[in-house]
Structure formats: structure tokens, C-alpha cells
Amino acid sequence: MSVTMNFIFWNVRGPNGTDKHRDLKEFLNIHKPLLLCLIDTKLDESSIPAMQRKLGSYPCYYLSPESRICLLWHSDQLDIQIIAATQQFVHCTILCKQSHKRFLVTAVYASNSSVERINLWDSIKQLSSTIGHLGWIVGGDFNEVRFSNEKVGGLPIHSRRVRKFNSCVLLSGLDDLKAIGHTLSWCNRQSNQIMCRLDRVMGNQNFINEYPHSIVEYLPPGISDHSPLKVIFEPSIPSGPRPFKYFESWEAHPSFNSTVCEAWSLHVAGNPMYQFSKKLYNTKLALKRWNRDEYGPLHHQLATCKRELNSIQTALQLNPTDHQFRNQEKVMRVQYTSLLDQEEKFARQKSCQLWLDARDSNTKIFYNSIKSRTVRNSICRLRNTDDDIFCVYDGSTWIMSIRNPVDERQLKS
């Protein structure tokens, strides 16, 4: 099955800290980028392995001079070769192992100094002369806008600086990729609020020809002051329904037996085999609802809080001077961080392990423990009263055994 290919460019303003590690881990689990370009990392070489263990699935990395840009990628999907790197950009060639397509990526973190940014514009123009027939995307934090409608609040746009940036874009054969979402990607989060489109992804014509349906999705910033940019190359592939899983811990709940008995006692007409199948189905639905009501509030609270935070941040981007939205966004960020901490504690308890470091729940061992427990608790076969297997789950459907059929008396016993 083909893998949905997307890259993430994100100025995380330093990924260190429990709240950022947790939020970044959840973010990656949702979006699953093959290439993660972290900007303004504030990392050093020695801290990268620990971050890799916490994030998981990113065995390869490159840290730019002065640790301003960090690339992490899936080596089983991408082959990346670094061509050039400075304090303001990392330029590399990428081979997608599945499609065998090769293209170039330049991750950018432009300096706050307008003088140093001119050096970056010159470097991008020089890189454009070496591209040849390959596709090329340039993305990241450019610390500059291109148009007057890309800034709200603060001082007026410096037209000369904008012209220099646009001249670089034009002479390099680049153009903004199609963007969705709210593109004012940075906010100063001060009383005198300023919002700008400092982050963007551009591509040359070769890239646009190769990936005509590619888009850049501006995602809510979460706990950063910059929005993550998700470059989507291919449409997502729908997956099948998740299999029903049974947890041993349910049996200790006081309402578990009554939930099962109530669902199983529902009247079902038909032959014994149909009755059994229908009763299993009714019980499964009842247990799924029961599990959601009894064990799901924390997950629902976290999801609801995340949606509300995204909604408020979206409204704030549309109304950057609204004091009520600013206050709501601040309160919601604190609440979201608190719920993340609660979920971490719940996950540690779910794994049934004792940890030397109570704060380190993002290790490979921790998540493997949860996965192992999930597999162990899933139902894959049913036995009758003679301990014979009469029903086996093959991953998508239940298959009845002809050798060991079950009769009505066994069902009712």
C-alpha cells in the first residue's frame, strides 16, 4: 500500500520542554510526516538522540550550523543527501524510495537581520542555477512577507525589503504553492498584537508539473507562535475500520457485567447461529459505547480542548485585535497543556510498568509496552464449553469453524 507523503516545516521555537515534547509527539502521530523540518530548534548535537527516542520513527537527522535547522526523516521511505548548509538554510536532494522520484528541498530559517537576509536571497538565487530539471521546494520561516495583506498590526511593511524578497523569488523561478488554512502564520502574542505570514513553501515549475495537486496546509500553531506548514504531495488513502479490542481491565469495573448481560439479553429472532452472531454484535456495540462513556472522558476532553484551541486561534487570526479572543486563547492553552499532562499519566498507568523517570513517557520501551498489552487484550478466537476453538478472527472478519460447531445449549450455558 502506498504511503501518503507529506513534509512538515515548523518553527517550534525550541522543542525542549515536557509540554512541547508531548504536543509535538501527538502532532506527529496525527500528521505522520516523512520529513520533519524543525526550525529554531535551540538544540545541540548531544540532545538529538534523546529527542529521537521521544518522537520515534525518525532514525536519521541533520543539524545545521548553530543548530538553527534540524531535519528528521524516515530512512525507510526517503534517501536524503545534504548538498549545502549555512546558518540560514539547508539544501538537500531527496529520493522517494516508493515512487523513485527525486527532487530538491531547501529548508529556510531567515535571519532577523535584514542585511543578513539579503545574503540568503543571493544564496537562493545561486541555488536556483544548479537545479537543472529537478523539482525544487523552498520552505520555512523567511522572516519577511511578500505582500501588503500578509501583515496585520505593527509598523507598516518596508516596501524595499519586500521588493528584494520578491525579486529573489521571481529570479529563482519560484512561486507559492497553493495554500489552505489561515496563512498569517506568526503572532507575537502581545497586547499590541502583530500577525504576519512569515512562513511559506514555494516551488519551481518542475515541482509543480510533477506534483500539480500538491498543497500547503497552514495548521493551527498550538503551543508555538508559528503555524506548522504541511506540504501534502498525494491524497490520503482511507483505511479500514479499527478492529474491536477487549481489555482485561474492563472486568474489574462494577458496571461491566450488567452491560454485557443487558446487551446479550436483547431479543433476537432467527436461527441459533444468527442469534449468536447478532448477540455478539449487540454486545460489541454496547461495550464500545460503555468504554467511551466510562474510560473516554479524558480523551474526549483533550480532543475537545484541542478543537476549541484551534477554533479560537483561527478566530484570533481573523480578528487579531480582539482582546476577548486573546484571553480565551491564553486560558485554553493552559488548559490544553494540563490535559496533556493528565493523559500522559493515564498512558503510563495503562502500560502497567514502573518507570525510573516518571516524566519520560515517550520512550520506545514505553510505547512498545502499550502496543504489546493491546495485542494481548484483543479477541482473536472464541472457545466453546469444551475448550474447542469454534470462531477465529482473521483481522477483518470472524470465521466459523466447521470442525467444532457450537450449539444452542453451549451458547446459553
Image: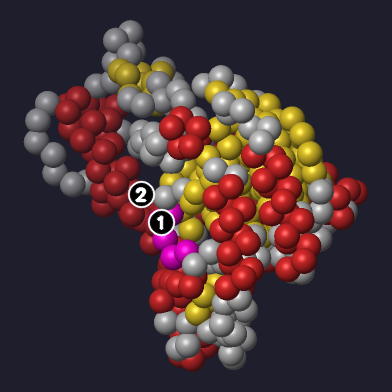
Camera sees residue 56: no
What residue would you read off at disc 2? Answer: 287
In the rendered view, tell whether residue 39 sits above or below residue 231: below
What residue would you read off at disc 1? Answer: 180
- Under tag 1, what secondary structure? strand
Query: Residue at position x 26%, y 34% from top?
Result: 412
Q: Is residue 147 left or right of residue 14?
A: left
Query: Residue at position x 38%, y 61% from top?
Result: 293
| Figure quadrant of residue 282 | top left
Mark 1 or mark 2: whose residue is earlier in sequence: 1
Q: Residue 82: give x, y in percent of width and height.
A: 76, 34
Q: Is residue 208 left or right of residue 137?
A: left
* Nearer to the camera, 112 or 172: 172
Part of the protein shown in magenta: 179-185
Please check the rendered image and state whether residue 182 is part of the magenta-colored stretch, yes or no: yes
Please check the rendered image and state whether residue 321 is part of the magenta-colored stretch, yes or no: no
